[in-house]
Image (cartoon, rainbow, N blue to C red):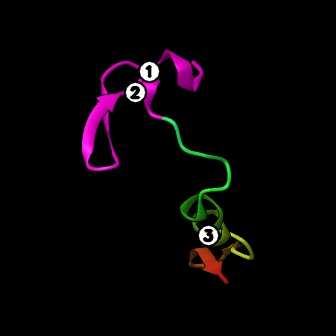
Amino acid sequence: MNMADRDGVIWLDGELVPWREAKVHVLTHTLHYGMGVFEGVRAYETDTGTAIFR
């Protein structure tokens, strides 16, 4: 399933819009800074379970 196959509505710009009509510009700050949250995050298996480090 790709993202175009989704049905329903999504909250966008203060209103509910059909999923297929919800568009976000590629230069949106939220998109770029939001993805940056995951940069540098590493997970390692330890004796006590998985440990996540930044």
Q: How many marks?
A: 3
Q: Read off the residue under disc 2.
A: 19
Q: Kindly indicate whether the residue at mark 3 contacts the one at mark 2 (C-beta within 8 angstroms).
A: no
Q: Earlier in the sequence, mark 2 or mark 3?
A: 2
Kind of residue sitting beneath label 1: Arg
Tell which tag, 1 or 3, sits nearer the viewer. 3
| Of callouts 1 and 3, the N-terminal one | 1
What's the residue at 25%, 42% (across, down)? 15
- Where residue 7 sits: x, y (%)? 37, 18
Q: Amino acid at mark 2?
A: Trp
Position above or below: 17 against 6: below
Residue placed under numbered mark 1 in the picture? 6
Question: Which corner quadrant holds the N terminus?
Answer: top right
Which stretch did the figure color magenta? 1-22
* Residue 41 found in image quarter: bottom right
Q: Quadrant of residue 28?
A: bottom right
- State the image coordinates of residue 13 (x, y, percent, origin top left): 34, 49
